Amino acid sequence: MNQCTETTIDISGETYPVSIIRKNYSRLSLKIRFSLRVFVSCPNHVSDEEAIAFMHANMDWLEINMSKIQWKLSLFPLREMMAGKKILWFGEVLPVVKNEELSVPFKFFNGKLYVPESYYESLREIENYAKSIVTEKYQIILSKMVSDTQSVLPLSFRLMSGSWGSCNVKTRHINLNSRLYYLPIGLVTYVIIHEILHFHYPNHGVDFHRRLEKYVPNHRKLERQLKNYDVLLY
């Protein structure tokens, strides 16, 4: 059974919330989420004092990574997104406008998203529409890579906390993050190609990168861009 202790820590003169999580971990580790909460994962036998000492021993890491995350957060209007006032739609920030006369669940028009009630009332339909766009893109890419995949690879969507996509080599199944529509379409394409290639190259070795270079010559640039969006994973 997981145990969690809540506390705080000062980093560069600011106070941040901390969650100390105990589980059957083999070692201590740190993570900072986009909420600016610090997570300490530790084995069950580790005390609060030991976990706090571990944070202070890694203060340089915390300062550097907290600064990086804050910079990445500045790229996105997260407060407005969480309040349903704006939406990140394939890399573009669009205002959300309420129009009670709208007869459909949502409508994109002139760089805005119109909804009849609230953004959250229409969210399921909006995400289903996004999935249909990504699915069409996936099918087009897969058809171009058929000689490398050799068979149809089933696709599903789910909310992921640590990645934009994953694959199961044994079942030959691809999962894509249901919030993939946050990303510009070029990064969506990159994520799809990346996951498809893993069916032939399970790791990120030389052969994987050689083939990735064939399909995405600018993949290193895209990888750097994708890292800016990792604060949106939760």
Image (cartoon, rainbow, N blue to C red):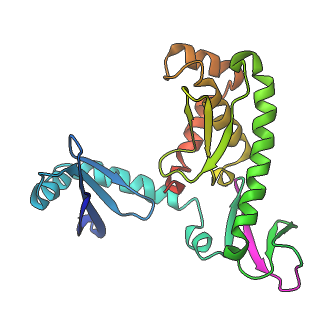
Q: Is residue 180 left or right of residue 54?
A: right
Residue 122 shown in magenta: no
Quadrant (top left/top right/bottom left/bottom right) for the N terminus: bottom left
Q: Is residue 191 above or below residue 49?
A: above
Q: Is residue 234 above or below residue 13?
A: above
Q: Residue at x 70, y 65 (%)?
A: 124
Q: Residue at x 52, y 44 (%)?
A: 163
Q: Residue 210: which quarter of the image?
A: top right
Q: Is residue 193 left or right of residue 6?
A: right
Q: Residue at x 83, y 83 (%)?
A: 99
Count of numbered circles on the image: 0
Q: Is residue 105 above or below residue 182?
A: below
Q: Where does residue 22 sit, x and y in percent of width and height?
A: 22, 55
Q: Is residue 25 above or below residue 77?
A: above
Q: Where does residue 64 sit, x and y in percent of width and height?
A: 34, 50
Q: Residue at x 61, y 69 (%)?
A: 81
Q: Where does residue 76 sit, x and y in percent of width and height?
A: 59, 62
Q: Where does residue 196 sit, x and y in percent of width and height?
A: 65, 28
Q: Is residue 100 left or right of residue 11?
A: right
Closest to the observer: 146 or 230? 146
Query: Residue lying furthest bottom in this view?
Result: 100
Residue 98 shown in magenta: yes
Q: Residue 56: which quarter of the image?
A: bottom left
Q: Which residues are magenta?
A: 91-102
